[in-house]
Image (cartoon, grey):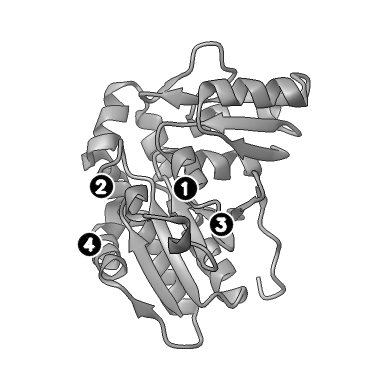
């Protein structure tokens, strides 16, 4: 198995970079963590879109009774939207049975960049081992982890999560795993920070900015590693749902 880590979506230069590969999109703070939380809370599906206007159009087409408009710009809830991008908002009472139409500054853009991959999974610290199990159980042999980054720049927390996933894949794999330099670097970073991931997230530029905006509780949530029954969200067509359960899981 070959695993590469791309530190920003800009490192995916064309569709051919992901075509016929399995892509894992990581936006630890906060989109992929929020998607994990939403599906755990019973959301029916999540539809990632590029813009607020796109989100409104999709929600209108599907009907407002069954959909919620979700997303942020500059980390804050978009005006007129039902929810922002804080996983704390995504409770079963709010999102249970609902279709969520989501647009975020970094995460949904990365998901859309990866959409031409053979398979697209959503990864975070929350579900790192579950994602790794899904990769190994699915017999994937060419995997690229795409960090959403922050405003197009390297993101400390996304690289941490990538390292957690890569390390777990290497643990579960029954055959050799070849890592590129990005994957090796992410494992080194994760190994250094693994004993206090909350502090690591807080030291990152984006984590510090979120705390200043009043979202320190999101760092608490998103820093949790391998939470019980963590789902593996998968982008199937234009919709994120629970990945197909493999027999070995």
Crowding near the residue tagged with mark 3, few <14, some 14–19, many ≥20 C-alpha atoms within 10 Å = many
Residue 98: x, y in percent? 73, 31
- Considering only order in the chain, which callout, 1 or 3, is on the residue closer to the N terminus? 1
- Relative to 145, is 119 on the left or the right? right
**Depth-wise, is mark 1 or mark 4 nearer the camera?**
1
**Depth-wise, is mark 2 or mark 4 nearer the camera?**
2
Q: Which residue is mark 2?
A: 154
- The answer to whether marks 1 and 4 mark residues whose Cβ atoms lie closer than 8 Å is no
Q: Which mark is residue 120?
A: 3
**Element at label 3:** strand
Residue 48: x, y in percent? 57, 37
Q: Which residue is mark 4?
A: 192
**Depth-wise, is mark 3 or mark 4 nearer the camera?**
3
**Depth-wise, is mark 1 or mark 2 nearer the camera?**
1
Residue 35: x, y in percent? 56, 41
- The answer to whether marks 2 and 4 mark residues whose Cβ atoms lie closer than 8 Å is no
**Depth-wise, is mark 3 or mark 1 nearer the camera?**
1
Q: Is residue 56 above or below residue 126?
A: above
Q: What distance separates the C-alpha of mark 1 from that of mark 4?
A: 30 Å
- The answer to whether marks 3 and 1 mark residues whose Cβ atoms lie closer than 8 Å is no
Q: Which mark is residue 113?
A: 1
Q: What distance separates the C-alpha of mark 2 from that of mark 3?
A: 21 Å
- Considering only order in the chain, which callout, 4 or 1, is on the residue closer to the N terminus? 1
Q: Quadrant of residue 63?
A: top right
């Amino acid at each position: 198995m070959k695993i590469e880590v791309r530190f920003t979506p800009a490192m995916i230069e064309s569709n051919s970079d992901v075509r016929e590969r399995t892509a894992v999109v990581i936006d630890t703070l906060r989109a992929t963590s929020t998607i994990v939380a939403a599906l755990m809370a019973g959301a029916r599906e999540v539809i990632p879109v590029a813009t607020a206007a796109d989100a409104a159009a999709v929600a209108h087409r599907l009907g407002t009774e069954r959909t919620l408009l979700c997303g942020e710009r500059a980390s804050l809830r978009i005006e007129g939207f039902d929810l922002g991008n804080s996983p704390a908002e995504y409770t079963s009472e709010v999102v249970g049975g609902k279709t969520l139409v989501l647009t975020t500054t970094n995460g949904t853009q990365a998901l859309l960049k990866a959409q031409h991959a053979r398979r697209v999974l959503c990864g975070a610290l929350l579900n790192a081992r579950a994602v790794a199990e899904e990769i190994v159980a699915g017999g994937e042999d060419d995997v690229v982890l795409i960090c959403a980054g922050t405003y197009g720049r390297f993101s400390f927390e996304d690289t941490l999560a990538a390292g957690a996933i890569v390390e777990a894949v290497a643990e579960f794999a029954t055959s050799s795993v070849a890592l590129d330099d990005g994957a090796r670097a992410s494992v080194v970073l994760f190994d250094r920070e693994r004993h206090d991931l909350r502090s690591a997230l807080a030291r990152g530029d984006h984590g510090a900015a979120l705390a200043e905006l009043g979202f320190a509780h999101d760092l608490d949530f998103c820093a949790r590693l391998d939470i019980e029954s963590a789902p593996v969200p998968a982008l199937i067509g234009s919709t994120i749902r629970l990945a197909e359960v493999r027999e070995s899981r």
